Structures are given as structure tokens and as C-alpha cells.
Image (cartoon, coloured by chain):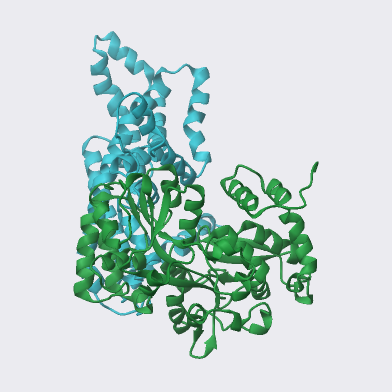
Chain colours: A cyan, B green
């Protein structure tokens, strides 16, 4: 067996998987997006751009997604970074494993169940009742954009913590000592050494969270009370309620394109900030 | 078992049932204290329809049957009894709208054996060739003559029987009367006006185009089923104005009504009854302008993987004794006179289940056009994304 054949054989499982599970469905969606809605729902194949011309009707959904996805990513980053820093740099080695496991533990339960828990926490008998008790009255949390943001940060935090943790953990601590010995203020050390060296982790974490957030529909549906409408929710409704598969496919294709553009811009930006392409480990 | 009650009152049965539903007691305790566990066994032997017949012999109908139905719409004890009698387990999938059920069947491979469509959707299922005609010889418990015509008729399309009636009911709203300030609620106009006023942030509407758009149309006195563009535009304006005042757009309104987060919600008969039984301060209101009256059916999708089990389950659930127990559990009326003969007299007089004739006569059955009308679907999407 030549090296070449062996390579092909080794690639075959992954290649087949991508063909059957990614390329074929994407092609179907693309073909559907040029079709028309059948009278009772579903799709009739055609070659029409009508569905794409109709896209402005889902502008609000795109706008909501493109607003909450970056905000959610940024908020997760701001909360995750200190935590990852603490875990990687400050914490005593013997506690490290336990604390890391604690970050992973929520992943052992379905996000659906955990979001339901938040429904009770944010509902009238949860946190608002507690606030009421300490004298802050009339707070409503559940079914607001704030509740959705809360759920997003909660759900995606571990995805942000881990890449940053890994890049900080690999950081050579002697560099920090050297910086300190040479008289740098701790903030200067952080800004000039720690932060740049953890940039790959930040870039990876943001990418992971942002891409998944763009397709999110469960958290807005559960914690937003159906009033906060993402592209994901628009897609669910187009396929499961109005059964307009053609239009749904056009919205899906548009989402993929928007995502590709955003990610490309993002990669350029990161590149300019000094991280190399290889640093963003999911690309 | 230490002590055995030979007799259980209706009140006690309902109390225990609700304790069981809320999870405060286990199924074993429930079956034991109510005697239903024993009753299922006794009934299995005493009721001819429940006696294991050749077709019911273990193994013959398979080990499972898959049912797609609505929330809070069955008595779990019935499924236990069915499994006991036939050996087939009932796997239940719950849906919140007819559209979603239709979408699953259109996509194919739903794997369902029995599902529960509403009257106005059946012609579409037949037109799309998604359901099969019912072979009544396999449903001996079905007695066409016992059913009230207007609730059973939509099951027949082009002279062929496609669906057997499950329950009927109405779509009104439930309201927590502690917050109405003494106002008697009786119209859809009040529903929407209060939502945008003293009930701001406390009202829920269904995540379901038929009822949410239909009941907004009633504000203006239009038909619940309108597909007229001008009338839909009026309804859309009302919905968009009301949206910032809504607590949620969801068909799962019982939890929020129970814990007090929501004060008012569009509501189906049985949910209204269940809420009212537990919390008498929650009233069920039918708008005097009208609204929806509906009838649900058992139907069998084409290609049902466990066809024999599907027929067996429908037959079992239509057995008057079982059907009566179901009605007691979920609070939806039945159109079968044999079942009504078994129900307690006070239930048959219950104003939530059996509204006054003048309220009923204003109601409309949903129309097939609303299910497939693209304008109504788009309106709902604009409302939700607004």
C-alpha cells in the first residue's frame, strides 16, 4: 500500500461524513431556496429569486441576532477572562482540576433543562421575589432581552473559558517574572505580555461563541417568552409553522453567507492584532 | 398495602388525581389509593371491549405505539392500563400547534402511529395524502350513531371516514380575577384593552396563528377565520400595539398562570378547567363576540409503523369507560353520548366545559383556508419579530 492510498483511506471516513452530512444537505437547502412554497406547505422546485427578494421581511430577526450575538460574545469574554486567568495563573495546582471540573459540570445536563431552571430563577417567585424582600420592588426579569442575555452568557461561558484557559496555561510564567524584575507595573505586564499571548485563546473562544450564537433559538424562545426573535426562531417557524421551506432555505443560506462574511472580517481583524491564522484553532 | 379503601368518592378521586399530576404522590400510590390499578385489572376482565382479544394477545400488536398529541390532554393512567391489557407501551410526543404536526408529516418519517389533528386540518391531510381511511371493523368501540354530528362530521372527507372524534372544546381566555378590580370579563375587546392597560406585562397569547390572529380579529368583530387583507391588517396593528404589553407568546401558559407571573392568557377548555379546579380565582371566559369552537380527532398517518397497535390504542381510548375517565382527568368534553351517560351530572352542567347556548352559537369552527394561507403565516412572523 502506497503512502498515497493510505492517506486516502484514512481520510475516507471524515470525507464521507462531510459529503453526506454537510455538503449534500447544504446543496438541498440551496436548491430549495430558489423554489416556491407549495400550496399546502413544503416546496415546489423552480428557479425564482422571489424568496431572496422577500428577505427584508425577516430584517428584524437578523437585526436582533446581529445585536445580541456580539453583545453576548463580548459579555462572555469579559466574564470568562478573569475566571480563566484565575484558573490558569493564580490557583494552587491541587485545586485546579476540581475547579476546572466545576466549569464543565453544567455541560453534563442538557441546555434545555438548564434553561428551564432559569425560567424559575428569573420568574416572579425567583430572583424578583428575593429583590422584593430586600426592598427592591417590581423587578421583572423573565421574558425580557436581559433574561435572554443572561441565558446566553450562562450557556456559553464554558466555551469561552476553556480556550482562554489553555492559552494562559501555556504562557511561560518566567516572562511575567522578567517583566516584573525589569520594573514593569503589573498592569503593563498584563497589557504587554499576558494579553497578547492569550490572544489566540480569546480569538478562538469568541469565534466558538459567536458562531453558535448566530444560530441560537432555544434560549430566546424559553427565556424571552417568544417575544425575542432571532434568525434561529424565524427558521424554526418557517419550517415548522408556516411550512414555507423555500423561504426558510433562503433565510438559512443568507445566514450562512452573513456568517462567512463576519468571520472573514473577524479573521482579518485578529490577524492585524498580531495573532497568526493558525492560532485560531477552530479554523 | 396496609389498608384498602373499597370505595373512593369522586371528589377524593379528583383530589388524588391532581396530587398525582403535581407530582406530590407517586403513580403507585395514586393507583393504589384510587383503586385504579385494581380497576384497570378488573375492567380488563369485566368490560368486553377491554378483554384481551386475539388481536390484543401479547406480541401481536407489537411492543409499542407512538402517539402525537397535545399538552395536558390524556390521563396517564389510561396508557398504563393499555400497556397492561396489550403489552404495547405508549410513547407520547406533545405538540403545540396543528401546523407543527402537519410539518412533521409533510417532512416524512414522523414514525407516528396515531396523532390528534383538529377539525379544520383534516381536508388538508387527505388532500396531501398523509392519512389513511379508518377501517371501522378494527375499532369496534366506535359507534358513529353515539356522536354529536357537528363534532364528528369533519372526520369524513368525500364520503370516506378518516378520523374519529376525540374531544371538543372552545378557545377562550383564563383570567386571574384577583387583578381585575371587580370588572367582569366577558369580551375579547376587554381582553385586548386590559392587556394594553392595567394588565400590561401580564397577558399571554398562543404561539399559534389560528387563535392569536383569530382572537385579534374578534376585537373588531370580524370572522375568526378571516383571510381578508384589510381585516388582517387591522388585526396586525392590534397585535403589534399589544406586543410590548405581553408577558409571553407561548402555548404553554399553565405554569405562568399558576405561579402568578401571568394574569390572563388565551386558553383552551381543559386548561381552563384544570386551572379553575386548582385555583378557583382563575376564571375561564368566552368572548361574547365569538371565537373558536373545535373538535379534535384520532387519525392514522400513512405508513404508520405499528398499524395494529394504532387501531388498538384508538379503540381502547374510545371505550366509553376509558373515555369518561379521560374526560374527568383533562376536563375536555366528549361528543359521545355513551360517555356522557357515565359522567357525573355536575360535570355535564359545568359552565367551563359546556358553555351557555348563546355563547356557543357565536363561536366558529376553524377553516381549512387559515392553515395554508400564506398571509396569516407571514402576519404571525411579523408579530413575533416586531
Instruction: Name the residue at 60% across, 42% down.
Output: B24
Q: Is residue B197 above or below residue A27?
A: above
Could you tell me which quadrant the N terminus of chain B lies in?
top right
Could you say which is closer to the camera, residue A184 or residue A45?
A45
Q: Position of residue B326 (x, y in %)?
A: 60, 63
- Residue B60 at x, y percent in the picture: 75, 72
Exactly how many numbered labels are in the figure?
Answer: 0
Residue B278 visible in the current orientation: yes
B340 displayed left or right of A25: right
Quarter of the image where one finds residue B55 = bottom right
Quadrant, the C terminus of chain B? bottom left
Instruction: Determine whether, in the image, residue A183 is placed left or right of residue B267.
Output: left
Query: Where residue B11 sits: x, y (%)?
Result: 62, 52
Asked whether residue A278 is in view, the answer is no
Along the viewing direction, whichever of B84 and A135 lies nearer the viewer: A135
Picture layout, residue B165 above or below residue A240: below
Residue at point 35% right, 76% down?
A: B372
Residue occupying image coordinates x 23% and y 49%:
B197
Frontmost residue, B248 versus B11: B11
Image location of residue B327, percent across then percent down: 58, 63
Side of B251 where B238 appears, left or right: left
Judging depth in this view, the residue of A138 and A117 nearest the camera is A138
Q: Is residue A217 above or below residue A167?
A: below
Amino acid at each position: 500500500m502506497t503512502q498515497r492510498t493510505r492517506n486516502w483511506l484514512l481520510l475516507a471516513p471524515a470525507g464521507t461524513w462531510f459529503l453526506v452530512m454537510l455538503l449534500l444537505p447544504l446543496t438541498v437547502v440551496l436548491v430549495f431556496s430558489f423554489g416556491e412554497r407549495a400550496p399546502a406547505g413544503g416546496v415546489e422546485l423552480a428557479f425564482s429569486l422571489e424568496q431572496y427578494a422577500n428577505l427584508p421581511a425577516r430584517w428584524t430577526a437578523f437585526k436582533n441576532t446581529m445585536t445580541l450575538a456580539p453583545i453576548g460574545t463580548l459579555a462572555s469574554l469579559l466574564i470568562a477572562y478573569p475566571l480563566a486567568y484565575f484558573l490558569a495563573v493564580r490557583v494552587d495546582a491541587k485545586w485546579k482540576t476540581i475547579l476546572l471540573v466545576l466549569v464543565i459540570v453544567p455541560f453534563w445536563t442538557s441546555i434545555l433543562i438548564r434553561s428551564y431552571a432559569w425560567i424559575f430563577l428569573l420568574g416572579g417567585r425567583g430572583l424578583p421575589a428575593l429583590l422584593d424582600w430586600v426592598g427592591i420592588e417590581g423587578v421583572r426579569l423573565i421574558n425580557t432581552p436581559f433574561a435572554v442575555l443572561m441565558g446566553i452568557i450562562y450557556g456559553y461561558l464554558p466555551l469561552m473559558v476553556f480556550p482562554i484557559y489553555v492559552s494562559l496555561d501555556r504562557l511561560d510564567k518566567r516572562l511575567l517574572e522578567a517583566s516584573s524584575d525589569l520594573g514593569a507595573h503589573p498592569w503593563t505586564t498584563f497589557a504587554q505580555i499576558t494579553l497578547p499571548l492569550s490572544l489566540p485563546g480569546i480569538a478562538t473562544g469568541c469565534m466558538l461563541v459567536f458562531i453558535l450564537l448566530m444560530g441560537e433559538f432555544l434560549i430566546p424562545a424559553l427565556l424571552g417568552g417568544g417575544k425575542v426573535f432571532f434568525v434561529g426562531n424565524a427558521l424554526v417557524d418557517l419550517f415548522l409553522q408556516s411550512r414555507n421551506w423555500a423561504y426558510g432555505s433562503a433565510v438559512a443560506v443568507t445566514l450562512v453567507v452573513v456568517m462567512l462574511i463576519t468571520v472573514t472580517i473577524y479573521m482579518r481583524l485578529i490577524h492585524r492584532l498580531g495573532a497568526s491564522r493558525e492560532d485560531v484553532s477552530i479554523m | 398495602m396496609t389498608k384498602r379503601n373499597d370505595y373512593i368518592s369522586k371528589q377524593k378521586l379528583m383530589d388524588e388525581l391532581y396530587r398525582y399530576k403535581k407530582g406530590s404522590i407517586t403513580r403507585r400510590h395514586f393507583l393504589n389509593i384510587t383503586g385504579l390499578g385494581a380497576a384497570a385489572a378488573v375492567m380488563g376482565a369485566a368490560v368486553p371491549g377491554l378483554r384481551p382479544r386475539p388481536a390484543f394477545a401479547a406480541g401481536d400488536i407489537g411492543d409499542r405505539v407512538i402517539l402525537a398529541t397535545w399538552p395536558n390532554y390524556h390521563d396517564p393512567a389510561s396508557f398504563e392500563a393499555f400497556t397492561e391489557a396489550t403489552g404495547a407501551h405508549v410513547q407520547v410526543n406533545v405538540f403545540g400547534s396543528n401546523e407543527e404536526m402537519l410539518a412533521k408529516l409533510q417532512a416524512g418519517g414522523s414514525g407516528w402511529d396515531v396523532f390528534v389533528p383538529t377539525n379544520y386540518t383534516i381536508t388538508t391531510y387527505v388532500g396531501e395524502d398523509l392519512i389513511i381511511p379508518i377501517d371501522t371493523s378494527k375499532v369496534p368501540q366506535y359507534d358513529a350513531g353515539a356522536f354529536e354530528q357537528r363534532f364528528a362530521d369533519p372526520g369524513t372527507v368525500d364520503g370516506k371516514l378518516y378520523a374519529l372524534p376525540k374531544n371538543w372544546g372552545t378557545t377562550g381566555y383564563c383570567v386571574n380575577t384577583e387583578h381585575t378590580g371587580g370588572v367582569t370579563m366577558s369580551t375579547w375587546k376587554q381582553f385586548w384593552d386590559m392587556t394594553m392597560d392595567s394588565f400590561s406585562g401580564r397577558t399571554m397569547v398562543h404561539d399559534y396563528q389560528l387563535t392569536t390572529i383569530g382572537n385579534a380579529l374578534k376585537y373588531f368583530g370580524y370572522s375568526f377565520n378571516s383571510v381578508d387583507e384589510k381585516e388582517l391588517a387591522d388585526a396586525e396593528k392590534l397585535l403589534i400595539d399589544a406586543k410590548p404589553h405581553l408577558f409571553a407568546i407561548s402555548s404553554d401558559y399553565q405554569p405562568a398562570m399558576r405561579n402568578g407571573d401571568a394574569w390572563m392568557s388565551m386558553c383552551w377548555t381543559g386548561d381552563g378547567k384544570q386551572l379553575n379546579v386548582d385555583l378557583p380565582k382563575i376564571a375561564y371566559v368566552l368572548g361574547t363576540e365569538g371565537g373558536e369552537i373545535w373538535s379534535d380527532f384520532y387519525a392514522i398517518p400513512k405508513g404508520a409503523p405499528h398499524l395494529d397497535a394504532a387501531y388498538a390504542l384508538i379503540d381502547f381510548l374510545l371505550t366509553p369507560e376509558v373515555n369518561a375517565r379521560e374526560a374527568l382527568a383533562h376536563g375536555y368534553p366528549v361528543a359521545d353520548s355513551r360517555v356522557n351517560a357515565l359522567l357525573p351530572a355536575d360535570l355535564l352542567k359545568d359552565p367551563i366545559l359546556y358553555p351557555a347556548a348563546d355563547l356557543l352559537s357565536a363561536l366558529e369552527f376553524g377553516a381549512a383556508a387559515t392553515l395554508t394561507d400564506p398571509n396569516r403565516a407571514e402576519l404571525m412572523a411579523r408579530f413575533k419579530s416586531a
